[in-house]
């Protein structure tokens, strides 16, 4: 939390950016906002007052970047910006009231200083030039080293950065007014417990260890510039959101190294593009933040408000999207929130409201429980959020005294959203009763007013509940039973899918019953359980506050009587055997079949064919499976031998796409009593077929696998060859295996061409080259040079030379190249060539001397 003040709030209202912070990755989304470039002429620092209602819009049209968009103590806006004398003069001539604060702004670094005691500002010391001081705040020109020294003295520093001016966006959220207590929102509020608020805060402020990554860890500081501590703190809240089932991510930025915010999202249903954010800063700081910076009030309290809101709201349905954002880098100048708000703006996020919680736990014992809600002056969207917060406090009788302060204060992360036009408010403890432990090691959980703290969170949760997007659910219930025994079935997954695509998973309890609240709408309901057929039904209507009953009966699966047959009944080696599986017709459920042929090979399907290459007796096992489980049966299959060679393949008919690679296994076996010598040849030999082994010798009942690789040619058509297996088998010295390959035609795509030189002249040879990126051969190419010459027809390669020699004059000519093949209509590419005149060089003639 940056130091608050009740004095003139103009200077705190500024866009906070640290110099040199760059977008880290594409996930940060930090594109540049539009804006005019800074002049290279000598610069001055200007204050431009905007008293008229149209002045802000008029200034925005200038495109000049600014340092800050501020408000004076009367609520009138003004700007701080760098400008050259010409720009300053033009602004004056356009009726703006311009004040020069610094005559030499070129290369200057400006900072906002804020202190709890104005006397602290007098410690600024060398290297710091005070340009403007108002109470406990000052605008200074300083070196980076001097500014860092001031930070060490307990003075808040904010470096001002130039940025394009963004006008407030008109995003009316339509918040309800004069609300009445709502039982559902009351249910939410009642879940905010003081014990939970205390425990969360104590864990975040290092009072005791918390579980992070499954290991106890004590977070005794959340200082952004630490490495392990801030990483652990962000991991802790990340895991908290993750445990609630919320999609969560890190939002990265660079601040002296990689830093990260934590963003969780509860997506809305029918209006998910409308976004509401509840946020707080997670980081803490003290005079020695590396060693101990508990930050219980500043700002574990606000962070706990966000965590508890997520705990509660995530159990309810909202039509709009809720984001839970915990930022780091706030104590260094709202850096984390600045980059996130910039990213949201550049992404076009429709953020309709931001509730920022910062220091919501301290209240002097016995004092009036005042809370402050800060908005921009006269901003109706901000004011609508603040009024809703006040109405919730009144409607639910919370012991808080809210005060709406329209001062445009910039001392916390809501200001980053203001700078890109989003409505936002700051919820904070009473500035007149401000914690005395600010930015000190004394900022511990014991100093907080737990009742005040808890009520602040209740009001925050209630405000989110009343923002206008709460969905009042309907309900579905039923009993899941066995269709045959009528017994209840526990642990059944019942899935209700809304017509919008949203899914809700329910599981039946030990009694077989299920119950769930659902977003109103039309649903399809499915139920699945091991051992049963799936159940599905549609058109189930869910209505607000109504309960729909859907009893589900699941049909149990059965699998009975597996059996298989094979033909021929007395197979010989090298002969295909057809196996056919079946089960008892009384079985229930779709069946799959798996086969083990007993020779190291397997198959899938109710009917399969297999060829044994060696005579033997094989145990064949068929396994039938369905939702009831698996059953198996085995039979012996006696394969008798032939005099010698046995082949697993009689032919190979293949279909392939253009350029596709296929493989197949050919097995050769020897059923003869003598050694079998064999060789493999192609007739005719083709380049598109290869074998891993082409010859060998097999002993009795030995076999060998040969991998055949087929590489489809780049031209369509039907290709054939014959594999001839030659051996010393006297009965089959040659066995032919016909191979047929059909290659599908691929359409042409990516036609283009180029030429050289780039600027040819008349009678100069021009080299044309080009072609298609993909497509089956043969390809016919046609050139048309538009110079009156005959068209040129080429096959497959269109490259060649052309001379523009018959032109009466130079000029521009549109050259086209067209291509076609058997399965593509002609595609055309064209380019305009400029033919330059013929260049004639005259000989040099030396003039006679005068």
Image (tube, helix red, strand yellow):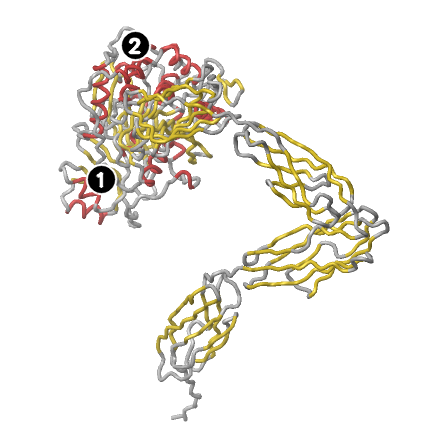
User: Splitting the image into 4 quarters, where does residue 523 fall?
Assistant: top left
Q: Quadrant of the C terminus?
A: bottom left
Could one spot residue 303 in this view of the protein?
no
On residue 100, which mark appears?
1
Packing grade of label 2 (10 A; few <14, some 14-19, many >=20) is some
Q: Secondary structure at mark 2?
A: loop
Q: Quadrant of the N terminus?
A: top left
Could one spot residue 386 in this view of the protein?
yes
The x and y percentages for residue 778 are: 52, 68
Q: Residue furthest right?
A: 674
Q: Is residue 838 left or right of residue 95?
A: right
- Residue sitting at x 68%, y 66%: 684
Front in this rendered view, residue 309 or 542: 542
Q: Check the image and report above or below for 472 versus 734.
A: above
- In contact (CB < 8 Å): disc 1 and disc 2: no
- Residue sitting at x 47%, y 76%: 793
The x and y percentages for residue 216 are: 52, 17
Front in this rendered view, residue 322 or 231: 322
Q: Residue furthest top?
A: 366
Packing grade of label 1 (10 A; few <14, some 14-19, many >=20) is some
User: Splitting the image into 4 quarters, where does residue 15 fall?
Assistant: top left
Query: Going from the N terminus, do you reach mark 1 or mark 2 first?
Result: 1
On residue 364, which mark appears?
2
- Residue sitting at x 23%, y 36%: 168
The x and y percentages for residue 308 are: 37, 19
The x and y percentages for residue 476 are: 35, 22
Front in this rendered view, residue 164 or 570: 570
């Amino acid at each position: 939390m940056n130091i608050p003040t009740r004095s003139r709030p103009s200077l705190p209202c500024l866009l906070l950016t640290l110099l040199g912070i760059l977008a880290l990755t594409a996930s940060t989304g930090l594109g540049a906002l539009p804006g005019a470039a800074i002049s290279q002429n000598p610069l001055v620092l200007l204050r431009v007052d905007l008293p008229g209602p149209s002045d802000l819009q008029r200034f925005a049209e200038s495109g000049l970047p600014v340092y800050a968009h501020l408000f004076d103590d009367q609520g009138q806006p003004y700007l701080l910006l760098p400008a050259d004398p010409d720009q300053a003069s033009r602004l004056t001539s356009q009726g703006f009231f311009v004040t020069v604060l610094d005559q030499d702004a070129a290369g200057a670094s400006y900072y906002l200083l804020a202190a709890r005691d104005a006397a602290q500002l007098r410690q600024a010391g060398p290297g710091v030039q005070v340009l403007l001081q108002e109470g406990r705040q000052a605008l200074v020109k300083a070196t980076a080293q001097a500014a860092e020294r001031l930070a060490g003295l307990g003075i808040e520093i904010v470096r001002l950065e130039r940025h394009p001016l963004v006008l407030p966006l008109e995003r009316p959220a339509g918040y309800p007014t004069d609300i009445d207590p709502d039982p559902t929102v009351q249910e939410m509020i009642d879940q905010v417990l003081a014990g939970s608020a205390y425990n969360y805060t104590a864990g975040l402020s290092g009072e005791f260890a918390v579980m992070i990554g499954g290991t106890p860890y004590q977070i005794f500081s959340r200082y952004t510039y630490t490495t392990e501590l801030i990483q652990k703190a962000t991991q802790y809240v990340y895991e908290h959101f993750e445990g609630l089932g919320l999609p969560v991510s890190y939002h990265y930025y660079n601040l002296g190294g990689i830093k990260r915010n934590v963003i969780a999202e509860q997506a809305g249903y029918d209006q998910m593009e409308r976004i509401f954010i509840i946020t707080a800063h997670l980081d803490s700081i003290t005079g020695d933040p590396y060693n101990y910076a508990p930050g219980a009030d500043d700002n574990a309290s606000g962070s706990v408000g966000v965590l508890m809101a997520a705990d509660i709201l995530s159990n309810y349905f909202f039509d709009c999207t809720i984001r839970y954002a915990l930022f780091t880098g706030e104590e260094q100048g709202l850096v984390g929130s600045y980059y996130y708000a910039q990213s949201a703006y550049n992404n076009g996020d429709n953020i309709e409201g931001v509730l920022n919680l910062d220091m919501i736990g301290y209240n002097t014992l016995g004092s009036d429980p005042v809370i402050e809600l800060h908005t921009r002056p006269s901003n109706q969207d901000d004011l609508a959020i603040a009024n809703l917060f006040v109405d919730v406090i009144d409607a639910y009788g919370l012991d808080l005294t809210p005060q709406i302060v329209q001062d445009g204060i910039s001392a916390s992360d809501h200001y980053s959203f203001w700078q890109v036009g989003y409505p936002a408010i700051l919820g904070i403890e009473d500035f007149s009763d401000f914690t005395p432990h600010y930015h000190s090691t004394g900022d511990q959980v014991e100093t907080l007013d737990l009742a005040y703290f808890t009520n602040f969170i209740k009001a925050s949760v209630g405000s989110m509940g009343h923002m206008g997007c709460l969905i009042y659910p309907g309900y579905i219930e039923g009993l899941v039973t066995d269709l045959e025994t009528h017994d209840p079935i526990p642990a059944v997954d019942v899935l209700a899918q809304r017509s919008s695509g949203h899914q809700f998973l329910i599981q039946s309890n030990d009694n077989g019953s299920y119950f769930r609240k659902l977003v109103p709408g039309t649903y399809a309901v499915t139920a699945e359980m091991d051992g049963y057929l799936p159940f599905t039904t549609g058109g189930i209507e869910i209505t607000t506050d109504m309960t729909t009953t859907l009893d589900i009966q699941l049909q149990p699966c059965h699998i009975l009587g597996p059996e298989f047959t094979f033909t021929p009944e007395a197979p010989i080696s090298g002969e295909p055997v057809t196996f056919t599986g079946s089960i008892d017709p009384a079985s229930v459920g779709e069946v799959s079949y798996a086969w083990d042929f007993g020779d190291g090979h397997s198959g899938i399907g109710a009917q399969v064919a297999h060829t044994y290459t060696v005579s033997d007796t094989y145990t064949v096992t068929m396994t039938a499976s369905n939702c009831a489980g698996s059953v198996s049966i085995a039979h012996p299959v006696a394969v008798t031998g032939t005099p010698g060679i046995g082949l697993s393949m009689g032919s190979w008919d293949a279909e392939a796409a253009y350029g596709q690679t296929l493989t197949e296994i050919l097995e050769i076996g020897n059923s003869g009593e003598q050694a079998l010598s064999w060789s493999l040849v192609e007739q005719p030999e083709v380049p598109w077929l290869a074998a891993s082994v082409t010859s060998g010798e097999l002993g009795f009942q030995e076999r060998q696998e040969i991998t055949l690789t087929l590489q489809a040619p780049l031209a369509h058509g039907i290709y054939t060859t014959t594999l001839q297996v030659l051996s010393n088998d006297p009965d089959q010295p040659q066995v032919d295996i016909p191979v047929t390959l059909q290659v599908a035609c691929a359409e042409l795509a990516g036609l283009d061409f180029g030429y050289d030189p780039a600027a040819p002249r008349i009678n100069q040879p021009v080299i044309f080259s080009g072609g298609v990126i993909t497509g089956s051969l043969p390809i016919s190419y046609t050139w048309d040079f538009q110079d009156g010459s005959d068209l040129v027809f080429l096959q497959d390669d269109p490259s060649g030379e052309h001379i523009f020699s018959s032109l009466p004059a130079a000029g521009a000519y549109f050259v086209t190249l067209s291509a076609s093949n058997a399965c593509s209509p002609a595609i055309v590419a064209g380019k305009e060539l400029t033919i330059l005149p013929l260049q004639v060089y005259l000989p040099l003639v030396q003039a006679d001397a005068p």
